[in-house]
Image: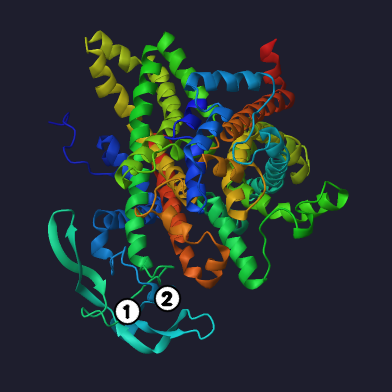
Amino acid sequence: MFAIVQAPPGDFLTTYVATLASSGSSINAEQVDALRREYGLDRPVWVQYLKWMENLAKGNLGLSLEYQRPNAELIGERLVLTMVLALLSFVFTWIVAIPAGIYSAMHPRSVVDYLLTVLNYVGVATPNFMLALVLMWGAFAYLGMSVTGLFSPDFVEAPWSLARVLDLLKHVWLPAVVLGVAGTARLTRVMRANLLDELNKPYVTTARAKGLSEWRLVVRYPARLALNPLVSTIGWYLPALFSGSLIVATVMNLPNIGPLLLRALINQDMYLAGSILLIYCFLTIVGTLISDILLAWLDPRIRLEEG
Amino acid sequence: MSVLAPAVPVTAEDRVSVASNWQLVWWRFRKHRLALVSALVLLVLYVTVLCPDFFSTQDPEATEARLAFIPIQRLHVFDGLRPSPWVPDVAGKRNPTTLRMEWRVDESRKIPVRFFVTGYPYRLLGVVSTRTHLLGASADGRERLHLLGTDRLGRDQWSRLVHGTRTSMTIGLTAVTFSVILGVLLGGISGYYGGPADAVIQRLIELLQSLPTIPIWLALTAALPRDWSPQQVFFAITVILSLVGWTTLGREVRGRFLALREEDFVLAAELAGASQRRIIVRHMVPTFLSHIIATSTLAIPAMIINETSLSFLGLGIRPPAISWGVLLQEAQNIQTVALAPWLLVPGAVVILSVLAFNLVGDGLRDAADPYSQ
């Protein structure tokens, strides 16, 4: 991680000096040297690395060179928003995909099934930043409103309150939907295929012969079995949402950690970038863990294997 | 004489039983109408990849501020009932308050679209020096032809799109080729030899798969030196994309090798004294080659989307190189899009190509195993 962040030639100060120079003010060599000593940038790379690791172990993410604020403080609130966005979009995916998949499987080759299939293919093929752009353009050109950001202007800097949470909920659904569309499409297809496989099994015929209503019959047994493979995909789907939110967030100008990482990378604000990359990795691992736990909870067969 | 089988298959059943594996795959693929149409779309796209300059109407780099934001001149194939393609003319007027040139489509005046016109010089396929282009307005340059309008710098979007298609489609293909090579090699070693090599490679795959892809890609591409040439950046991006992309294929190949190693025909070949190399290349790889092709076809669209996203964020392919992502960067600002919606057209092409790759991939996957039902 550290190697990646260190890789670009030059360091933060070269970028900083260049920015100062381009904005007209100048800085002399002595001042640059003083700054370099202050940030520890004059010492060899491995010393910088050890220092970083030492601080990490103490739970200290270091100081952002650009913002002159502790990284933990910069990342904190944005991290919460990143997670809220990913979770909402996850919920959206499941709420839409599972009923759609079940319906498709119960009525194969119907008009709705074909329609859903077409939508699925298009949904998978659309890059999510493209969808975000089209929606923003549509809202701007035809409704005359701007759908960027997560808060109304009044609430951007406001402290957390009930009103601010409500305001967040008013704005967050659109990015959540944009982020979830591709996943929804994929999930619907998987759900449909799984359920179709299950519906051909003898126990379904038995249940039908016993006169169970079709809806109850499907939801009670085969749908639950068809869910299993889906749960095991959470492991990579949640991380994919976290990384996907980076692009959507940049396009829609959302205050989560995505745009912060982008800026940090471009300005070579290495401790900030490194911390954010670490957090992404951490979120990925948490996602995998959640899916393992869920799977064990849902499917007793997996639980028993352990014992 | 009656013991001899007929040399020429007569019934359909006979044909199937003597057909080669690839013939069977093709017959099954042919039944998949959508996949066939998509394959045609891809063929057209790759033909433009071969010689983008021939299909361009203008130099994609030629800028002229006066010609900024010209709207799309819709191509009409018929003039009345006569097949003679034309586009409506555009008229520019300077807005007295903003002093900006504003272009409007003027349906009353027609500009004929000619075939094989003379335009800017280029090298066809990199060899033949020529000035001939497939489409164009009159050669003297007084008539304007912008099939997809122009961007903020007055560059012709159609020509830029054709050039962007070359970059983006090639990057998808080369990145997947790299992934396939890496995946087959490492997956093969892992599955065939097993033991410590298998353990090391599997842990490596797990490590790579547990990394959040997009942030890592961003960090890696941000680390590319700013002064690299477009060719170097192109190559680096390809390598970066495939470094993560090979893991899925590696796993699949390993699984195949593990399953095939126990098969009777491998044992037979071993007993017949075939070398390890011959067993792998001659007996094992052909049995899952069609699967590899299908999987890689399905991997290309993901690569294309990734490249487009990276370039869109400004960390992938960089101007002056043109790719779909670079073109869409022009549409990043919502005010600009409201002013010139045609800047979103490259996005539609992205969707079209990804759709086509997915459909072809699905068709191939179904056809890959011709003996299954």
Answer left or right for B144 relative to B117: right
Q: Residue at 56% across / 70% down in the picture?
A: B338
Task: Name the amino acid, label 1.
Answer: Arg
Q: Residue furthest bottom?
A: B108
Mark 1 neighbour density, 10 Å: few (under 14) some (14–19) many (20 or more): some
Q: Position of residue B267 (x, y in %)?
A: 31, 12
Q: Name the quadrant containing residue B194.
A: top left
Residue projecting furthest to the right: A162
For the question of whether residue A142 can be seen, the reply is yes
For the point 46% across and 13% down, the residue is: B199
In contact (CB < 8 Å): disc 1 and disc 2: yes
Q: Quadrant of residue B40?
A: bottom left
Disc number placed over residue A83 in the picture, else none? none
Give me the C-alpha separation between circle 1 and circle 2.
Answer: 10 Å
Q: Amino acid at mark 2?
A: Ile
* Location of residue B66 by image quarter: bottom left
Q: Are marks 1 and 2 on the same chain?
A: yes
User: Where's residue B311, x and y in %?
Assistant: 45, 49
Which of the numbered marks, if any, corresponds to residue B144? 1
Q: Which residue is depicted at the point 45% across and 14% down?
A: B200
Q: Residue B297: horizontal and vertical position, in percent?
A: 39, 42
Disc 2 crowd rating (10 Å Cα; few below 14, some 14-19, many 20+) is many
Q: From what the image shows, is residue B182 above or below residue B140?
A: above
Q: Whole-percent x and y of residue A303? A: 70, 18
Residue A181 visible? The answer is no
Q: Of helix, strand and loop, which one carries label 2? A: loop
Q: Which mark is residue B70?
A: 2
Label 1 lies in what chain?
Answer: B
Q: Secondary structure at mark 1?
A: loop
Tell which circle, 1 or 2, labels the residue nearer the N-terminal end: 2
Q: In screen coordinates, is A76 left or right of A114? A: right
